[in-house]
Amino acid sequence: MKLHASGEDYLESILILQKKFGMVRSVDVARHMGVSKPSVCVAVNTLKDGGFLTMDENHFLHLTDIGRKVAETIYERHCFFTEQLIAAGVDPETA
């Protein structure tokens, strides 16, 4: 399955939230990304269908091995470019 940028953003957000809190639900993703819960629901279903994540009986989201790999790649890329922008003098919040 080909991921769009928005799917990558959802995976990255789930990864960040898992590192920060351990367990993640859709509502946490909605708050973190500033999007609606229905938007997260659509994205989660698409990502589940693509094999990037699963949801357990308590509605916690879990990245699959491939989902984690994609999320970590995107996260590392964003960190790299953020560091480069900050080094070039861009305000950290803007970067």
Image: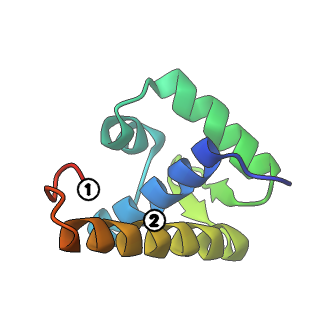
Residue 84 as seen in the image, left or right of residue 48: left
Q: Position of residue 4 (x, y in %)?
A: 70, 46
Q: Nearer the viewer, mark 2 or mark 1?
A: 1
Q: Residues within 10 Å of mark 2 (few under 14, many from 20)?
A: many
Indicate whether 11 appears above or below 32.
below
Q: Check disc 1 and report the residue beneath it.
A: 95
Residue 63 as seen in the image, left or right of residue 19: right
Q: Disc 2 to disc 1, how far (Cα)? A: 20 Å
Q: Which residue occupies 66% across, 58% down?
A: 53
Q: Position of residue 57 (x, y in %)?
A: 59, 50
Q: Position of residue 67 (x, y in %)?
A: 66, 67
Q: Using the image as rendered, state which of residue 84 and residue 72 is in the foreground.
A: 84
Q: Are marks 2 and 1 in contact (CB under 8 Å)?
A: no
Indicate whether 58 appears above or below 62.
above
Q: Check disc 2 and report the residue beneath it.
A: 15
* Res 21 quadrant in image: bottom left
Q: Which amino acid, mark 2?
A: Leu
Residue 13 as seen in the image, left or right of residue 71: left
Kindly give the residue lying farthest to the front in the view shown: 88
Kindly give the residue lying farthest to the right in the view shown: 1
Q: Which residue occupies 31% across, 73% down?
A: 84
Residue 81 is labelled as none
In what quadrant of the picture does the C terminus appear? Answer: bottom left
In what quadrant of the picture does the N terminus appear? Answer: bottom right
